[in-house]
Image: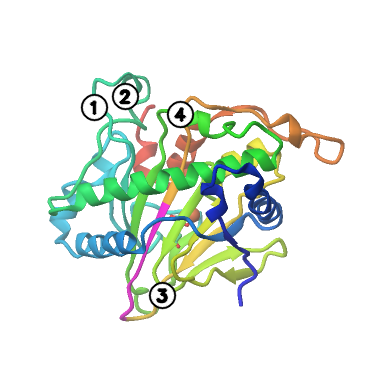
Amino acid sequence: MSSIPLIDISPLALEDRQAWQPVIDAIDTACRDRGFFYVTGHGVDPALVQQVFDMSARFFALPDTDKRAIDITQSPNHRGYGSIGAEQLEEGKPTDWKETFDMALHLPEEHAYVERCPSMYGPNRYPQLEGFQSLMERYYAELFPVAMRILKAMALALKMPEDFFSQSFSTHVTVLRVIHYPPRPEQVHDNGAGAHTDYGCITLLRQDQIGGLQVRGVDGQWIDATPIEDSYVVNIGDLMQHWTNDIYRSTAHRVVSPQAGVHRYSSPFFVEPDFDTLVTTLPTCIDTEHPLRYQPVTSGDWIQSRFKATYSYRNKETS
Ligand SMILES: O=C(O)CCC(=O)C(=O)O
Ligand SMILES: [Fe+2]
């Protein structure tokens, strides 16, 4: 039995702020203790999620050349298909045994944000697969308000105005990713995704029933984040840890590859604010017990520094 708490967030969809309070308290405790929790009552239709997973499996089953046509290493703004070997989340480990597809807000080339930060903003790249784009866009649009509700609860838990985090999401870089973990390579390693923390505010992760996600506890032990039907695993990212002076924990996690013959699919939603958001530690998180630990950093600088550490092709870029 996993010790990651499960929180029903359905009251956050109500107008009545008093109804929010038990949820705010439960999220606050989970963020301080472990930095990971499951949510139910999110309101996302399970049939839609199933369609996304089915579509994702169809995409990853396409011939390599079709997937490579939208290779992320050819995208100026980090969108499209990441083959096995594109990303290595843990230094000193073999490359992650997974393939990915990333999308975010689709902005035309002439948009002001694309001109200001072309390495994060711009067009999405979609495969030639009927219904793929519209389905992924629909899912992205459904999930985004759920993330904003959770961020509002966190802002209130931290004694900040409700919109404190969500106001930094006007032209954000929230990424929807789908992942395929093929069976582990025979006798070689079981490193589906190396140990890492996520980079942004929070991540909402949907996983199939195979299992393999593990979360590092304060004692350094890995515990299984066992799949729970119709739930998201929510975790804190680095920017939130920075904002909260380490009071909310950006917890390391990893994925163990499935056994021979088994394929695992998952879909993280990386909730990341506008690239020029200046993340300055909250005054409500600084006291004698918690002296200030961080200098301000912009969201874009932080996230791009992580991309450079984990995607070798990004190192070749000048900006
Ligand atoms: O696939 C999973 O369960 C987790 C993936 C993950 O941690 C990530 O992509 O950052
Ligand atoms: Fe992660």
Q: Quadrant of residue 223?
A: bottom right
> Label 3 vs label 2: CA separation?
39 Å
What amino acid is found at the position of numbered circle 1 in the picture? Answer: Pro
Q: Quadrant of ligand 1?
A: bottom left
Picture coordinates of residue 37 (x, y %)? 59, 59
The stretch in magenta equals: 261-268
SS at badge 4: loop
- Neighbours of disc 1 within 10 Å: few (<14), some (14-19), many (20+): few
Q: Is mark 1 within 8 Å of ligand 1?
A: no
> Label 4 vs label 1: CA separation?
17 Å
Q: Answer yes or no: do the residues labelled 2 and 1 have beta carbons within 8 Å? A: yes
Picture coordinates of residue 252 (x, y %)? 58, 56
Q: Name the residue located 24 percent from the left edge and 27 percent from the top edge.
A: 108
- Neighbours of disc 2 within 10 Å: few (<14), some (14-19), many (20+): some
Give the label on residue 210, or none: 3
Tell which circle, 3 or 4, labels the residue nearer the N-terminal end.
Answer: 3
SS at badge 1: loop
> Label 2 vs label 1: CA separation?
8 Å
Give the label on residue 114, or none: 2
Tell which circle, 1 or 3, labels the residue nearer the N-terminal end.
Answer: 1
Q: Is residue 195 visible?
A: no
What amino acid is found at the position of numbered circle 4 in the picture? Answer: Phe
Q: Name the residue located 63 percent from the left edge and 54 percent from the top edge.
A: 35
What amino acid is found at the position of numbered circle 2 in the picture? Answer: Val
Tell which circle, 4 or 1, labels the residue nearer the N-terminal end.
Answer: 1
The residue identified by callout 1 is 108
> Label 4 vs label 2: CA separation?
11 Å
SS at badge 3: loop
The residue identified by callout 4 is 275
How many labels sit on residues? 4
